[in-house]
Amino acid sequence: MANIQLANINEELTRLWDEAQGEKKTRASLFNLIIYAKKNKRVDYYQSLVKRVVSKFPCRLILIIGDDDSQEEYLKTEVQTETLGEGDLQIFCEIIRIEVAGALLERVYYILLPHLLCDLPTYLLWTQDPAIDNAILPRLESIASRIIFDPEETQNIQNYAQATLKLLKGFHCDIGDLNWSALLGWRNIFAELFDTPEAIDALEQSAKIQIVFAENPTLGLRHQEIEAAYLQAWLASTLHWKFKAFDESEGKSRLTYKRASGEVVILLSSEKNENYAPGSLLSVDIESAQNGAKWHFGRESQTNQICIQYSDQVRCDLPHYMHLQNIEEGAEIINEIFYPQRGSHYYQMLEVLTQIPWQNK
Amino acid sequence: MKDFPIPNITTITLDDEQQEGGFESPMKEEQEGQKVTTPCILVIFGATGDLTARKLFPALYNLMRDGQLPSHFACVGFARRPKSHEDFRAEMREAVSQFSRVKPIDENLWNTFTNQIYYHQSNFDEDNGYDGLKTLLEDLDKKLGTKGNRIFYLSTQPSFFPDIVERLNKHDLIYNTTKVQDKWSRVIIEKPFGHNYSSACDLQKFVMNHLDESQLYRIDHYLGKETVQNLLVFRFANSIFEAFWNSHHIDHVQITVGEEIGIGTRGAFFEEAGILRDIVQNHMMQLLSLVAMEPPVSLDADAIRDEKVKVLQALRPIDMDNFSDYIVRGQYGPGYINGDSVIGYREENNVHADSSMETFAALKLYIDNWRWAGVPFYLRAGKRLPKRASEIAISFKQVPKILFAQNANNLENNVLAIRIQPDEGISLKLNCKVPGPSSPIQPVKMDFRYGSYFGLTPPEAYERLICDCMLGDGTLFARGDEVLASWKWITPVLERWHEAAPTNFPNYASGTWGPDAADRIMKEDGRSWRLI
C-alpha cells in the first residue's frame, strides 16, 4: 500500500475497482466499520480483526490509528482492497487506513465524514478507554449506528463499567462490548445447564467459585482477567448476590458476595497456557453449600468443548461435554455487528462491576 | 471598436436557398430518437470569463468530438478585452486541454475546430459593437454555411442581460418569429434570472418585449445532468415506482446539494446572492418539480414544463409565525476539508468581516396537492460540507411494526436515492435477514452506477444543453412561469432574512453537514438527515 492524499481516497478506490472489474468481481458493502485504535502494541490485534471481518463480510472498513503521544504531526492515508469468495462470486471490499498524530487528531471526525457509504449502518469499534474523556468519541457517536467498546483497553474495570453505564444512558446509538460478546459461549452453557429451579437454587447457594484463565506473556493486553471478571459479575448479578469485599494479591483476585443465606467467595486466578488466547477461560469450579454439590467446567485441550463434571453427597455423574460457541478469533466483533445481545443482563453485570475496586493497570 | 479580419479559411460555396436555411435535403432520413443539429453560430457574451473556459468550450469540443455539432458551425466570443482571433483560440485550446472530460486533446480535431472559433471585441453597451458583430456573423454565414441561425449565450453578469437583449433586438440579431421563419435566433441566459420575485417579473416583462418565450433558454445546468434527465425515464418508464410515488407510500423526500468547496474567488458575487438564490431557487426547485410532477401528456417541452410549474404553484406558503420550524440558514466558519484546515466564510476574499450572507440553507416544505398531501420535502444546500454530493432521496413509509417487533429498532425505511453527482446512479435500501438461525435484520443496498453499466463518461451537462438549444428543444430549460413561481415562494424567505440579521453566524464548521438547527427541524419530526 502506498501513501495517497486524503482527497484522493475515492479516486484511488475507483481506480482499484476499475482494474479489478475484468476479474468478475462485485463491489459491495454491507456496512461501514470504523476502528479507532491507539498506536500501541494492540494495533496488530486490530489489524487481524480487520482481516477476519473482511474475510467474511464485504464492508467499507476504515482503520484509524491515532498517536496522541507523538511529538510530530502527521497524517498518512492508504487504501487497499480485499476480495472475498472465488470464481464468479468474488466480492470486492475496501479498506482505508489512516494514521494520524499530534494535533491532527482533532480532525478525525472531519476526515471520516466524507468516506462513509450512505444508507448502510456504521459501526464504530472504539478501542480507547471510554472512562477517559476524549473529544473525538462524542463526535463519532453522532454518526455511528452502534459503538463497540473493547474493555481490554481500559485502565480500570470499575471506571470502565461506570463510564459505559453512563454512556448507555446518554448515547443515541446502541453500545456493544467485545468482552461481553466473547463470553457468550460460557453464558449459554451456564444458561443451558442451570435450567431448573433446583439447579438454580443449588448454584445460588454456592460457597466458593474458582475461575482460572490463561495468562500468557503479551505486549498488548492489560487485563487478561477481564473475561473472568465479567463471568463472575454476570453470575453475581443473575443470582442477586450483593458485593461485599475485594482483595487482590499475588496475581489472584478474591471477591466476596453476600447471598440469601451466607457468603460466596469467588477466586480469579491465572495459569500459563499458550494453547489458548490470553484471557481465555480455562476452568470454572463451583462448590455449593447445598448437598455438597460441585461442578467442574474445564476446557478440553484445543477444542471448543467444555467438559462438565458434577457430584454431590449422593451422586457422581459421568463427565459430559458441551459445545462452546463463538470462540474463533474475531468472532466477537462479528457477533457485535450482526447479533448484538444487550438485554438487562449486560446492564446488571456492569452494575456489579461498578462496585468492585479493581486496581489500575 | 476594433474589428478583426476573418482569417482565410476554406470557403464553402452554397446556393442561395441553402444560405437562407430553408432547404432540407431529400437525402436526409430522420431517424427515430435521433435529432440532428442544424447549422448555426454560437455567440458567447462574456467569452473571457471562467464559464466559457471551464464549461462552454470543453462542451463544444466534446460535442464536436462526438459528432454532435453541426458541420456548418462557428463560435464567436464577444467580450470587452482586446484580443485577436488567434489569441482567443490559443486560450480556448488551453482551457479545453485543462477542463475537457476527455483528455488529451485530439490535435487533428482541434485543428478543424480552431478554424471555427472567432473573437469580437466590444463593450456590451456599444451599438457599434453589435453592428460589427452582425457584419461578422453575416460574413461567417457566407463562408461557413451557417444559414443565419444564431444562438446568443449570455455568460455575463445578470445586470447586462437587459442591455444585451435590447441591443441584439435593435440590431436585428434577434429575429421576429412571426416574420422570419427560414432561420432562427435563440438566447441562452445563465442564472440568476432576477434576484427576487419583483425583479424577475420586471426582467421577464422587459425581455419579452424583445423576444418570445420560445426564443429564450434559461439554463440550469443541473437539468442537463444524465441522472436528472433519467428521472423522467425512471418515474414514467417503470411501472413499479410510479405506483408508490405518493403520500400513501412515501414518508418524506430529502434533496441535498452539497459542495465541499467554499466560495473561492466568487466572494463579491456570493455576498449579493447567497445559497438560497445561487442554488435553492433554481437547481433545487427544478429537482423538486421533476420529482413531484404529475405524468405529462407527452414528452414535449411545454407538456413537461406545464406539469413542473404546477408543482411550484402548489407549494404551501411558508408559515411566517413558525418560520424557524421550516427554514434554517447557516454560514460556514473555519474547519477541515480533506484533513486540511480551511478558513471561514467571513475570512474569504471580497467578503465582509461581519457578513450575514448564508452559505447553507435547510427548508421543509409541503406540496399541497392530492399526490403529496402531508409529505414533507426537506431541502438542504450548502458550501463547505463534508463532500460534494447532490442527490434526491425518497424515503418510504415503514411497515407496521408487528411481525418484526424484536427488530423494530433495526427496521429502517426503504430509501430510493438518486445520485446526481458525483458517481451518478440510483440505489435502493432494503431490509434483509442476516443469514443464521436467529433473525436479525440489516439494511442492504442495491446500487446502479451509470459508470459501471454503460462504461462511458457521461456527457457534461453543458454539452447536452447547448445541443438541445441548437435543436430548439426547451425541455431541459426553465420556462418563465417556472422561474417566477419559484421566486414567488422564495422571496418571502429572503425578505424575512433581510429584516432579521443572524446573530449566531458562523454557525457551522467547515467540513460538517451544517448547523445544529438544521438537524433540529428533522429531529422534531422524528427524522434525520441522511449521512451521504
Image (tube, coloured by chain):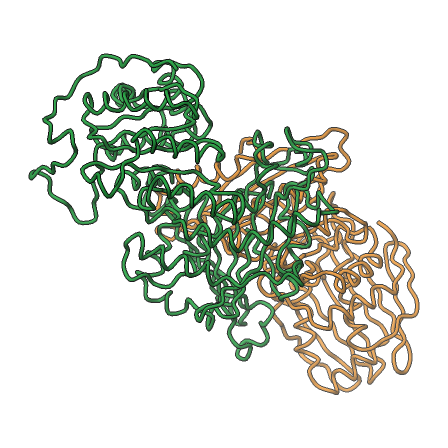
Q: Quadrant of residue A99?
A: top right
Name the outermost residue toward the left. Answer: B26
The one of B93 and B431 positioned closer to us in this rendering: B93
Count the marks: how many? 0
Work out whether A353 lies above or below B505: below
Residue in the image at 37% along x and 66% along y: B242
**x, y percent for residue B322:** 66, 63
The quadrant holding residue A156 is bottom right
Colour of chain B in the rendered structure image:
green
**A157, B455: nearer the viewer:** B455
In this rendering, would B147 be left or right of A221? Answer: left
> Chain A's colour?
orange
Up-down relation of residue A200 to residue A126 (above or below): below
Name the residue rendered at 37%, 69% in the picture: B243
Q: Could you tell me residue A234's position as x and y percent?
A: 77, 70
Residue pictured at 75% horizontal, 75% vertical: A295
Q: Is residue A338 visible?
A: yes
Q: Judge from the rendering whether residue B191 lies leftward or rightward of residue B85; answer left or right.
A: right
> Residue B171: percent from the left, percent from the top?
32, 28
Rendered position, B123 above or below A1: above
